[in-house]
Amino acid sequence: MIAPLCAALSAVVRQRWQQAVRLLPPLLPVIARVGASKAQLEVVEETLLHALIEGGEHERAAVLLSARLERRSSPLDRRRLQTVRERRAPRGAEGAPPPLHGARHSLQRDSTDHLLVLEMRQTRWR
């Protein structure tokens, strides 16, 4: 499991979004089975979400965000889902918005004011 995870993360670092999107999803159930914490699983999901958005896979990002929201409430994921839904367009459609590139990451306190969350920000999202 370590080697495939390293390969997937390496693809993210090299900004090979399609490769990362192909490698990360099969790892999620394996990571859960080997005893990873919820926080560790969330980090891999966040990485997948980032790769999906950067790779222009807005529909798949919306599906992942919806599944996360079914598991637990998250104002951050609700905002992300709304933004992704606004950005998605049929593939090959003229005038489709460009993929979201260059997202800045920042740590920000959430509504409980004691848990730090990773939020992707980009000025072109709005």
Image (cartoon, rainbow, N blue to C red):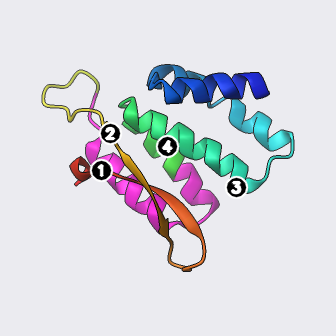
Q: Residue furthest left?
A: 95
Element at badge 3? Answer: helix
Q: Residue furthest right?
A: 34
Asked whether disc 1 touches disc 2, contact meaning CB atoms under 8 Å apart, the reply is yes
Marks 3 and 1, how far apart in space?
Answer: 24 Å
Would you place residue 72 above or below residue 52 in this image? below
Quadrant the N terminus occupies: top right
Magenta residues span 66-90
Would you place residue 82 above or below residue 16 in this image? below
Q: Earlier in the sequence, mark 4 or mark 2?
A: 4
Q: Give left or right: position of 46 versus 34.
A: left
Nearest to the eye among marks 4 and 2: give it: 2
Task: Name the kind of residue labelled 3 in the image.
Answer: Ala
Q: Percent from the top left, x then y, of residue 36?
A: 80, 47
Q: Residue at x 19, y 25 (%)?
A: 93
Marks 2 and 3, how far apart in space?
Answer: 25 Å
- Residue wearing tag 1: 122
Task: Name the kind of residue labelled 4 in the image.
Answer: Val
Q: Earlier in the sequence, mark 1 or mark 4?
A: 4
Marks 4 and 2, how far apart in space?
Answer: 22 Å
Q: Earlier in the sequence, mark 3 or mark 1?
A: 3
Q: Residue at x 55, y 46 (%)?
A: 46
